[in-house]
Image (cartoon, helix red, strand yellow):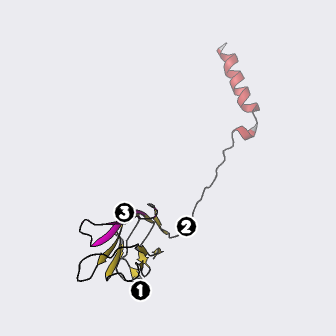
Amino acid sequence: MKNKFAFAAVLALVCAPAASFAGTSADINASGQASSFCDISNTGGPISMSISANKDRISGTGAYSFTANGDAFVSLSALTPSAPQGAAGFTQSVNLANLVSSTSSTQAVDGAAKTGVNKLNGTITTEIIQSNASELLSAGTYSLATTATCTAL
C-alpha cells in the first residue's frame, strides 16, 4: 500500500505541468515628490470686538489654523482700520499668536520663519486702543481688516 502511494506521488510530480514548478518575481519601485505647501485659514470666522471696562479699547479674539510641511512664514497685509468720523486718536493691532503681529496701517509685516513641519491652531487677537489725552475711545462703529498670507520657503 505504501508503494502504491509513493508511486502515485512520484507519478503526479512527473506528470504535473512544468509551470507549477516555475517561480516568478516582480520588481516594485515607487517614488514621488511632496511639494512644499503652507496653509493659513481663519477658522473662527468674523471677529466680534467689544469695548473694555475702562472704555479705552475695543478688542476681540478669533482662531486660525496653520499647516506647513517645511519652512514657511506668515505675513499680514497693511491693517485697514475704520472708525467713526471725528473719532479721537487710536492705534490698531492684529496678532496671530506664535506667527505674526502687526500695528502698521502702511506696510505688510512678515512673521518669523517657522521651520520644519508645523500644524498649529492658535488665537487671533484684534484690538483698537485709544491714543488720546482723554483716554477714552470715541463712540461709534470700528472695524479692522487685514489679509494673512502663508509662504512656503
Question: Image point 76% across, 36% down: which residue?
Answer: 17
Secondary structure state at the residue bearing disc 3: strand
User: Quick check: can you spot residue 97?
Assistant: no
Closest to the observer, 26 or 41: 41
Give the mark, 1 or 2, whose residue is nearer the N terminus.
Answer: 2
Secondary structure state at the residue bearing disc 2: loop
Q: What residue type is labelled 3?
A: Gly
The quarter of the image holding the N terminus is top right
**Residue 25: x, y in percent?**
64, 50
Give the mark, 3 or 2, whose residue is nearer the N terminus.
Answer: 2
Instruction: Tell me the distance, in whole angstroms, between the alpha carbons under discs 1 and 2.
Output: 36 Å
Closest to the observer, 131 or 64: 131
Instruction: Tell me the distance, in whole angstroms, between the alpha carbons under discs 3 and 1.
Output: 24 Å
Label annotation for residue 47: none
Q: Is residue 53 magenta?
A: yes
Badge 1 crowding class, 10 Å Cα cut-off, few under 14, some 14 to 19, many 20 or more, is few
Q: What stretch is highlighted in magenta?
A: 45-64
Question: Image point 73% across, 32% down: which residue?
Answer: 14
The image quarter in which residue 70 lies: bottom left
Q: What residue type is labelled 2?
A: Gln
Marks 3 and 2: CB-CB under 8 Å?
no
Q: Which amino acid does label 1 sit on?
A: Gln
Label annotation for residue 122: 3
Secondary structure state at the residue bearing disc 1: loop
Say above or below: 153 vs 119. Answer: below
Residue that label 2 marks: 33
Instruction: Tell me the distance, in whole angstroms, between the alpha carbons under discs 3 and 2.
Output: 29 Å
**Residue 43: x, y in percent?**
45, 61
Residue that label 1 marks: 107
